């Protein structure tokens, strides 16, 4: 009985500085993971909300007219296959439609596009819009 009592009374040696450093680093890593999970849980999650706007002046090069546009997703979720239309209506009422598709547009992301027309869109009416998108 005295042998078991002696083993219970023995104290563990103090932790070394390497053990304390390892413990501190692992505690920081674990705290970081828990914080990232906690940030993701609460809050409002907005659905995709793609918008488009003309991003600059029309540029003429070699008989073609380039219209820069920016497509942005103002929501939190990703939009898939975002279809962007540029409709040019000339002074005589002739309509020219061009479209492009952005495969994926993450929440808060902005993508730059350029539409090309044979006629100068500054001489008529130009409208750019999002025609539709998918939710992955």
Image (cartoon, rainbow, N blue to C red):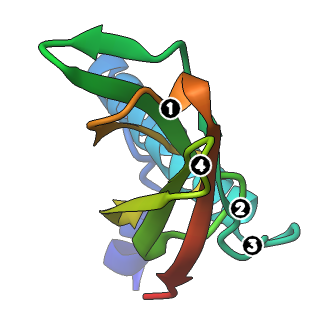
Using the rendered view, name the quadrant where residue 122 is placed.
top right
Question: Eyeballing the image, is 26 above or below 135?
Answer: above
Of badges 2 and 1, nearer the viewer stands 1
Nearest the camera: 97 or 36?
A: 97
Distance of mark 4 from mark 2, alpha carbons? 39 Å
Distance of mark 4 from mark 3, alpha carbons? 55 Å
Image location of residue 77, percent across then percent down: 60, 70
* Mark 4 or 3, nearer chain start: 3
* Mark 3 or 2, nearer chain start: 3
Quadrant where the image shows the C terminus: bottom left
Left or right: 43 in relation to 89: right
Distance of mark 1 from mark 4, alpha carbons? 13 Å
* Mark 3, secondary structure of its residue: loop
* Mark 2, secondary structure of its residue: loop
Distance of mark 3 from mark 1, alpha carbons? 47 Å
* Mark 4 or 2, nearer chain start: 2
Image location of residue 43, percent across then percent down: 87, 67
> For the residue carrying disc 3, how many other residues have a C-alpha within 10 Å: few (<14), some (14-19), or many (20+)?
few
The numbered mark at residue 92 is 4
Question: According to the image, label 3 marks what residue?
Answer: 41
Residue located 46% across and 17% down the image: 58
* Mark 2 or 1, nearer chain start: 2
Left or right: 94 in relation to 16: right
The numbered mark at residue 75 is 2
Residue located 42% across and 62% down the image: 97
Labels 1 and 4 touching (C-beta < 8 A): no
* Mark 3 or 1, nearer chain start: 3
Question: According to the image, label 1 marks what residue?
Answer: 121
Quadrant where the image shows the N terminus: bottom left
């Amino acid at each position: 009985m005295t042998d078991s009592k002696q083993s219970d009374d023995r104290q563990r040696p103090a932790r070394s500085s390497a053990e304390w450093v390892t413990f501190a680093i692992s505690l920081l890593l674990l705290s970081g993971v828990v914080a990232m999970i906690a940030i993701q849980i609460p809050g409002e999650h907005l659905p995709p909300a793609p918008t488009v706007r003309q991003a600059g002046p029309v540029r003429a090069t070699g008989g073609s007219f380039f219209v820069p546009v920016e497509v942005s997703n103002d929501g939190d979720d990703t939009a898939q296959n975002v279809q962007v239309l540029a409709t040019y209506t000339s002074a005589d009422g002739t309509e020219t439609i061009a479209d492009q598709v952005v495969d994926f547009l993450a929440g808060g992301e902005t993508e730059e596009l350029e539409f090309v027309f044979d006629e100068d869109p500054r001489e008529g009416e130009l409208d750019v819009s999002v025609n539709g998108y998918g939710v992955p």
